[in-house]
Image (spheres, rainbow, N blue to C red):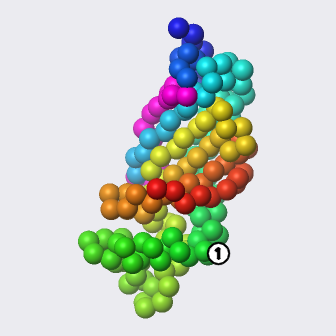
Amino acid sequence: MNHLNHPYFGPLDTDELHGIIWEQSHTLNGETFDVHLWGGNASDAEQHPSMLDAFAKFLQDLPAIDVFARQQLTHYLTEDAYFIEFHAEGLTEGSDVMAQLLADANGGNISAAAFSAKMKLQNIGMWLDLPDAPIIMDYMMEPEKSDQILAVKLTLDHQLATIAWES
């Protein structure tokens, strides 16, 4: 079994192919979510220690990056409000969050900023074998009621690569 010891992540099993080589729960703004480091090819962690360093910095800077990601979500939802409309129509019963957003809209459209502020950061994946967008932050509206995700995909230097609607 091959191991790499990283100052932030500790010992990593570099024999793991395409699986999770590190995971931890994190809390931000009172919400807990999972963070996974995916191994990619067996030697990716050994070949790219700078990626591990960048992932560690990302986690250390997460509060500011979450603000940036939500700004990007707001822009995305302003350009295309269908994700909001989908949830406004599909989560009308039993959703205190959507009821509040609809009430705040006062008969108008739910604002993209208000919607993105209420989304939950559900999961973060850091991928050693995705060099163009190795950090993926999954945001959801009421994950216990909807499986729809807006995945904010970031570069190693925390810039937006893309946002994708997934489920």
Location of residue 2 with respect to 144 vertically, above or below:
above
- 101 with respect to 81 (left or right): left
Name the residue at the left extreme: 94
At x 52%, y 44%, the residue is: 124
Question: Does 21 appear in magenta?
Answer: yes
Q: Residue 82 in the image: x percent, y percent?
A: 53, 75
Q: Is residue 19 magenta?
A: yes
The residue pinned by badge 1 equals: 79
Q: Residue at x 43, y 91 (%)?
A: 107
Where on the picture, by quarter, is residue 131?
top right
User: Does the magenta stretch mainly form a helix, a strand or a loop?
Assistant: strand
**x then y, percent, for residue 118:** 45, 66
Q: Report if residue 15 is visible in the image.
A: yes
Compared to residue 10, the image places residue 2 above or below, namely above
At 26% from the left and 71% from the top, the residue drawn is 94
| Amino acid type at image mark 1 | Glu
- The stretch of residues the image draws in magenta is 18-30
Residue 5 can be seen, yes or no: no
Instruction: Name the one closer to the observer, 91 or 25.
Output: 91
Task: Classify 15 as above or below 59.
Answer: above
